[in-house]
Image (cartoon, grey):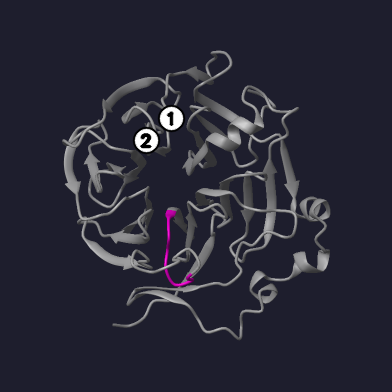
């Protein structure tokens, strides 16, 4: 896959601002200053240790750019924030202060295999992984894309599994039926959930060799109704596989070999996961974020907007959180399944009980 990239064009901040017509002066200002937010009262969610303060205007695009449906958000080892939405541009990268770094987009005439239009319809999951000292991104495309693509941090493709143009050692044919998320184990094993299709969970080794499949549609343990997200939890002595079983309102927990272990109930519609220090954060598309401890106890519920009218406009609540991530300082970034993505950063501001 030498010289093949998932996105055919990478704009630097300067290039994108020139294309969009934004001024260099605007680009150099911190986002919070652009928003002139210092006079506004602080917006906070949560309580105690799990208190977070909204950073107004963080991650806004300059004129000429707009978000689509919010798919995924991750941070890399330098706290750069990668935002994936279903629009052009497809991927936007910020530093932790909200300054635009790069924009990745698709040019139909330059793309290989799957058109830009197809990618924009099927883009869904994004996962950051550090493997043997190197950093990688895993993109999950559901129908009609039906594939998982591993790239380096410059977008160069190093592995594909699923809908591929032709088979090779780094391009592995596999019949996915609308995958939604991926997670990577410490040994490089790849776990993929077919959340919008077959309700199957697949395990591959680091080279894409298929190892096992479980699941199917149902309500009994080991079956799913939108197995939307997957995560490898390392909070306990042994790592475990967490599956967000969205429409069944639960998280199913498995061994690394995909043997059922237990169920975490009491959630509404969990989407996916992010582990930070001693907790797992779960975006619940039914209007809140849940925080779990190592014993699977719900220790915090953040921004519950279920009973709030027009919750997609109220800054202190969530409407449809679809993905989230945290940076090294514990600041929270949440992306919603809304036409404008509603990307927001919440600074961690823990309070004494």
Residue at the spot x=67%, y=62% of the render? Answer: 99
Which residue does the numbered mark 1 point to in the structure image?
178
Residue 278 is at least partly visible in this image: no
Magenta highlight on residue 129 = no
Q: Looking at the image, is mark 1 or mark 2 earlier in the sequence?
A: 1
The residue sitting at the front extreme is 309
Residue at the spot x=65%, y=32% of the render? Answer: 116
Whether 231 is drawn above or below 291: the answer is: above
Whether 138 is drawn above or below 174: the answer is: below
Task: Give yes or no for contact between labels 1 and 2 (Cβ–Cβ under 8 Å).
Answer: yes
Whether 340 is drawn above or below 329: the answer is: above
User: How packed is label 1: few (under 14 Cα within 10 Å), some, or many (20 or more)?
Assistant: many
Residue at the spot x=55%, y=72% of the render? Answer: 55
Rendering coords of residue 97 (x, y %)? 61, 66
Tell me the element at label 2: loop
Q: Nearer the viewer, residue 158 or 149?
A: 149
Rendering coords of residue 25 (x, y %)? 81, 69
């Amino acid at each position: 896959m030498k010289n093949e990239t998932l996105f055919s064009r990478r704009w630097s901040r300067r290039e994108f601002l020139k294309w969009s017509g934004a001024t260099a002066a605007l680009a150099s200002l911190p986002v919070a200053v652009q928003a002139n937010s210092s006079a506004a009262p602080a917006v906070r969610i949560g309580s105690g240790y799990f208190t977070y303060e909204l950073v107004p205007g963080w991650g806004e695009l300059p004129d000429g750019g707009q978000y689509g449906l919010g798919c995924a958000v991750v941070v890399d080892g330098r706290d750069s924030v990668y935002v994936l939405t279903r629009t052009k541009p497809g991927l936007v990268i910020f530093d932790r202060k909200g300054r635009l770094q790069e924009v990745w987009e698709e040019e139909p005439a330059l793309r290989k295999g799957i058109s830009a239009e197809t990618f924009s319809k099927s883009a869904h999951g994004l996962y950051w992984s550090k493997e043997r000292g190197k950093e990688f991104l895993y993109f999950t495309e559901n129908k009609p894309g039906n594939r998982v693509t591993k790239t380096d941090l410059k977008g160069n493709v190093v592995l594909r599994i699923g809908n591929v143009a032709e088979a090779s050692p780094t391009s592995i044919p596999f019949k996915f039926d609308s995958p939604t998320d991926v997670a990577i184990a410490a040994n490089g094993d790849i776990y993929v959930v077919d959340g919008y299709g077959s309700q199957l969970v697949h395990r591959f080794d680091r080279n894409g060799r298929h190892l096992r499949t479980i699941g199917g549609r149902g309500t009994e343990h080991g079956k799913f109704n939108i197995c939307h997200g997957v995560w490898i939890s390392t909070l306990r002595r042994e790592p475990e596989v967490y599956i967000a079983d969205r429409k069944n309102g639960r998280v199913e927990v498995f061994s690394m070999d995909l043997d059922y272990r237990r169920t975490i109930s009491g959630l509404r519609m969990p989407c996916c996961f992010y582990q930070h220090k001693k907790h797992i954060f779960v975006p619940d598309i039914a209007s809140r974020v849940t925080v779990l401890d190592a014993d699977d106890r719900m220790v915090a519920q953040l921004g519950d907007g279920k009973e709030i009218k027009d919750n997609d406009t109220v800054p202190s609540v969530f409407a449809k959180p679809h993905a989230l991530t945290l940076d090294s300082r514990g600041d929270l970034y949440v992306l919603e399944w809304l036409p404008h993505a509603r990307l927001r950063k919440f600074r961690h501001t823990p309070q004494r009980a």
